Amino acid sequence: MIAHLRLAVFWLIHLAALAAFWTGVRPGDLVLCAVLYAVGMFAVTAGYHRYFSHRTYKLGRVSQFVLAWLAQSTAQKSVLWWAANHRHHHRHSDTERDLHSPRQRGFWYSHVGWILDPATDEANLDYVRDWQKYPEIVWLHRHELLPPIVLGVVVWAIGGWPSLVVGFVWSLVVLWHGTFTINSLSHVFGWRRYETRDDSRNNPLLALITLGEGWHNNHHHFMGSCRQGFRWWEFDITYYVIRLLGVVGIARDIVEPPAHIVQNEPHPNRAMPAPAE
């Protein structure tokens, strides 16, 4: 029942975007839409992905909660659900056990079908035992819809129905599908610098849409790096912002990809095997 309700709400929000024909589209609401998209995408990439899924940098407890709240305001379920499923994805990427592999289940299922599948409604929280020691994160997990509801109410209270539809709903729908492209398109279109065990690819267009997540083959080659654009020309806006947070003392211990990883060479301190006779 809950899964069917979630499916109905998902499509009703898409239909709600059409309400702009009645509310109108004001320039200020378009600006709000862009701002909410940028903040929300950063929260997804820096929060759900690079922080809660891969722990590629560290935050204090307050800023950790704020980032989790912002991430959940995008209505992509809780940080525990998101991180657990993403860690499962890396363990089984593009195999039959992958939850959203285009190779296994096709584009549509990998893009959005898996999220709406009742079978994925509950995540295996054994993957995120490290985060369950924080009661505030567990509380957010239990109240996963509270952040987007609060954001929607605040937007409506400030700007009325036009801001709710254009600023909030439009940004939410575009953000959803922007995020979903990494599960679907980035395993199909692009180039492969590294021979990983999956189909991950680097795609500059997807990197632009997702603030840096499109360097997906880089990421699968070394998932422990906060920086996903390994080369100087591979723009990674999420990483740049995290670096700025490091400058002001909010973020720390930001993990960079080691030079031998970038060059795809053996570890310099690891002894090479003797040549065969």
Image (cartoon, rainbow, N blue to C red):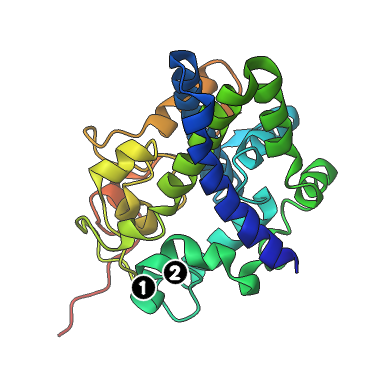
Single out the residue that lies furthest toward the bottom: 277
> Can residue 132 be seen in this snapshot?
yes
Crowd rating for badge 1 (residues with CA inside 10 Å; few <14, some 14–19, many 20+)? few
Single out the residue that lies furthest toward the front: 22
Q: Where residue 189 appears, x then y in whole percent? A: 23, 58
For this view, does 79 lie left or right of residue 105?
A: right
The residue shown at (31%, 45%) is 206
When the figure is inspected, residue 29 is found, relative to residue 172, above or below; the finding is above
Tag shown at residue 267:
none
Crowd rating for badge 2 (residues with CA inside 10 Å; few <14, some 14–19, many 20+)? some
Residue underneath mark 1: 106
What's under tag 2, amino acid-wise?
Tyr
The residue shown at (68%, 50%) is 78
Quadrant location of the C terminus?
bottom left
For this view, does 195 lie left or right of residue 70?
A: left
Q: Where residue 178 appears, x then y in whole percent? A: 41, 45
The residue shown at (51%, 17%) is 247
Residue underneath mark 2: 109
Q: CB atoms at circles 2 and 1 under 8 Å apart?
A: yes
When the figure is inspected, residue 134 is found, relative to residue 154, above or below; the finding is below
> Can residue 254 be seen in this snapshot?
no
Please tell me which residue lies in front, 105 or 54. 105
Single out the residue that lies furthest toward the left: 277
